[in-house]
Image: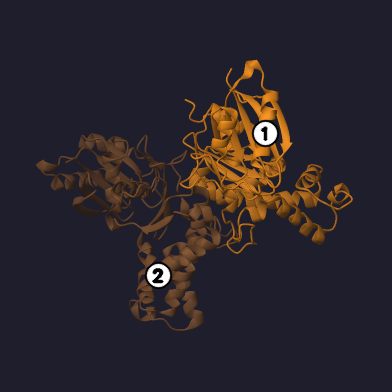
Chain colours: A orange, B brown
Amino acid sequence: MRTAIGVDLGGTNTKTAFIDESGRVIKKKVFSTPAPFDRGAWSATLKEYAEALKTSERAPCGIGIGIAGLVDPNSRRVLHAPNIQGIDGWAIGEDLEKAFGLPVKADNDVNVMALGGHFFGPNDGSKNIVCLTLGTGVGGALIINGQLYRGSGFTAGELGHITINEEGPQCSCGNHGCAEAYLGNQRIVRRFKDFLRKDGNSIVTDMAGPDGAVTPHMIYEAAKKGDAIALKVWEETAAHLATLLSGVINLVNPDKIILGGGVANAFDVMEKPLWDNIHKRALKAAVSGLRIVTSKQGEDAGVIGAAALVLKEGAA
Amino acid sequence: MRTAIGVDLGGTNTKTAFIDESGRVIKKKVFSTPAPFDRGAWSATLKEYAEALKTSERAPCGIGIGIAGLVDPNSRRVLHAPNIQGIDGWAIGEDLEKAFGLPVKADNDVNVMALGGHFFGPNDGSKNIVCLTLGTGVGGALIINGQLYRGSGFTAGELGHITINEEGPQCSCGNHGCAEAYLGNQRIVRRFKDFLRKDGNSIVTDMAGPDGAVTPHMIYEAAKKGDAIALKVWEETAAHLATLLSGVINLVNPDKIILGGGVANAFDVMEKPLWDNIHKRALKAAVSGLRIVTSKQGEDAGVIGAAALVLKEGAA
């Protein structure tokens, strides 16, 4: 069976794994991404782990890399990765090909997750898919006519920076009222604190650590237990998410929306208000036939998707 | 030279023309669309005009039809056309094929305009194009990888119904804060009246007819003459347009945006504030290399695009 090395290069950690043709993780390793980034040291560590993971039965046919940043998949060069200091401009594909003697493909991390979800996810015949990752930031990617759509400058799919309220709060990108300014982790926690200040009590305050830090996960756990404030946080979050998705639905008319990232774990408490608000906002014809699901690949989505670059995309 | 009959079926008028392979209008006719719609009478009138337009040198190779509504291009059936009463469900392609003895293609009117603009417009190498029509309503279409992208249920490209302010005014579609609720003709006129009420004088009041009716065209003419209120109307309109386009730019990362419809004629007074606001809102990497232009096909865009369905799309 063909295998590939998938690499998920993030600002904090680098994950690498052997992935087989069915998208299964055979074995994986995680190491800290050097900060500031050191190309030689990082490549050497990657090679060491790859050698250790390799066996005679699974000689890899290539290396796929997903990177938290803007990547040119043709030149396989990192254009801009704001969270990995010192990597901008690196022709990572060329250098790793020399170091490993294997073909290398590289792309943005959310793009490869979308590819992995498309090729290794449930084969339901979906051709047009919107992928949205909800975490510290809000990312996205588009599958159009069964292929990853990268846009003219490889930046397509930035769902987090679609404006949902032109008079809204400022976003990290400088714009006002981006979806990310309503759906990012910090905003969800702030929403909780605002409700708490007004309405009094929540069991989340007992769940918070000694430093008082609250996470979306705690708010989710509380909502599952029926905590009124936590439920309101997810209802309001779902309403903003619905505004974003309705616009994207009207523009793209996809078969399927896949939600990933940490906040997507709260999908079960958001699902009803999300659909209620989408039905209020989106065009009826554009919603008919649409499904919204969560990613099933969890924390391995990055390495699986990276391997899909090699094992699936353009491999026919 | 190959020719085709292009038909632009709107709520008020039907335009038909012979179009040659270069997208040139050879000859055209306009007649009133019957209301309520009468399939037999409409087809008979169309046939009469087509026969009259025909000469021995230009036997058409097919008929392309653009319809103001939702159309299934495969079954060539009208799914929903809110402004053409009595047409919903009509298998227009099949019926016209019988009546004319020619292959017939049918699609949404904005989709075919986008096709026409792509195939017959300036050949500048653009592959990913966003088309936006600004008039009574706000429509749109997407060219992705050089092909018209229709979406999973043929509804893609509804740029007018992307929310730009989730707390905004109600739109005709029922949603709140759609782009159309800021950019449609009526809203532009209302914006003018609001400014006039606050700020006093405008030469537009002298341009209005005896019934006092104001049009976007008058506001444009006044802006060209330096009328302060008219200029403010286009500045504010451009700012809302920039919010819409910035979101679409961040999602689609196109090479080019083509603006069509009546309001696009005011592009010269909107261009500067439009770009200023796009630079404030859109991601830098997504904007680099982007061009925004107006459609050059004017009022013939519909018939030219309809002919492109036959002469160009899938004709290879």
Amino acid at pointer 1:
Ala
Q: Which residue lies under the disc numbered 2?
A: B269
Identify whether A131 is placed above or below B171: above
Q: Nearer the viewer, residue A313 or B184?
A: A313
Q: Is residue A235 visible?
A: yes
Query: Mark on residue A44?
Result: 1
x, y percentage for residue B274? 46, 64
Amino acid at pointer 2:
Val
**Quarter of the view holding residue A263:** top right
Count of labels in the image: 2
Q: Is residue A298 visible?
A: no
x, y percentage for residue B254? 45, 49
Q: Residues within 10 Å of mark 2 (few under 14, many from 20)?
A: some
Circle 2: element type: helix
Q: Nearer the viewer, residue B204 or A81?
A: A81
Name, please, the residue furthest toward the top.
A57
Q: Quadrant of the C terminus of chain B?
A: top left
B81 horizontally vs A159: left or right? left
Residue drawn at 27 percent across, 39 percent down: B310
Name, please, the residue furthest toward the bottom.
B200
x, y percentage for residue B158? 46, 50
Residue drawn at 42 percent across, 75 percent down: B230
Chain containing mark 2: B
**Quarter of the view holding residue A30:** top right
Q: Residues within 10 Å of mark 1 (few under 14, many from 20)?
A: few
Residue drawn at 84 percent across, 58 percent down: A200
Q: CA distance from mark 2 to mark 1?
A: 57 Å
